[in-house]
Amino acid sequence: MPPASSQPLSDAGVNMVLFTIPRSFLLQVGTASILLLLLAEKATVETLQTIGEASEELFRGDRLPILDFPDHDELSGG
């Protein structure tokens, strides 16, 4: 059974008006962009997690000043 198209697969690509973009180039660009998106996603998750931990430390209370409240005995009659 003969192939559906007589054009070889290596020459196939996206035909624009003035030029043709080969499929292998499109595959390389798509693969690179997906890998960059995965790296950016990982960096974003790590950054947001670090910011969350820093804000948790800020509101934790260990770093808040100790306030000097008067005792109950001093207020009632002392």
Image: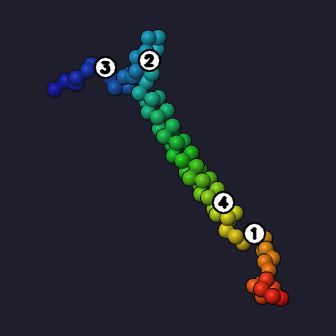
| Tally of numbered tags | 4
> Which residue does the numbered mark 1 point to in the structure image?
64
Judging depth in this view, the residue of 28 and 66 nearest the camera is 66
Q: Secondary structure at mark 1?
A: loop
Task: Check the picture and name the quadrant holding the C terminus.
Answer: bottom right
* Disc number lying in front (1 or 2): 1
Q: Judge whether 31 appears above or below 62 on screen.
A: above
Where does the image place residue 43, in percent across and percent down from the top left?
Answer: 59, 50
> Which residue does the numbered mark 3 point to in the structure image?
7
Q: Which residue corresponds to the image point at 56% horizontal and 53% vertical from the top-left?
A: 45
Task: Check the picture and name the quadrant holding the N terminus.
Answer: top left
Gap in Å between the C-alphas at discs 3 and 2?
A: 14 Å
Q: Secondary structure at mark 2?
A: strand
Where does the image place residue 54, in percent across and percent down from the top left?
Answer: 67, 60
Q: Secondary structure at mark 4?
A: helix
For residue 14, the mark is none
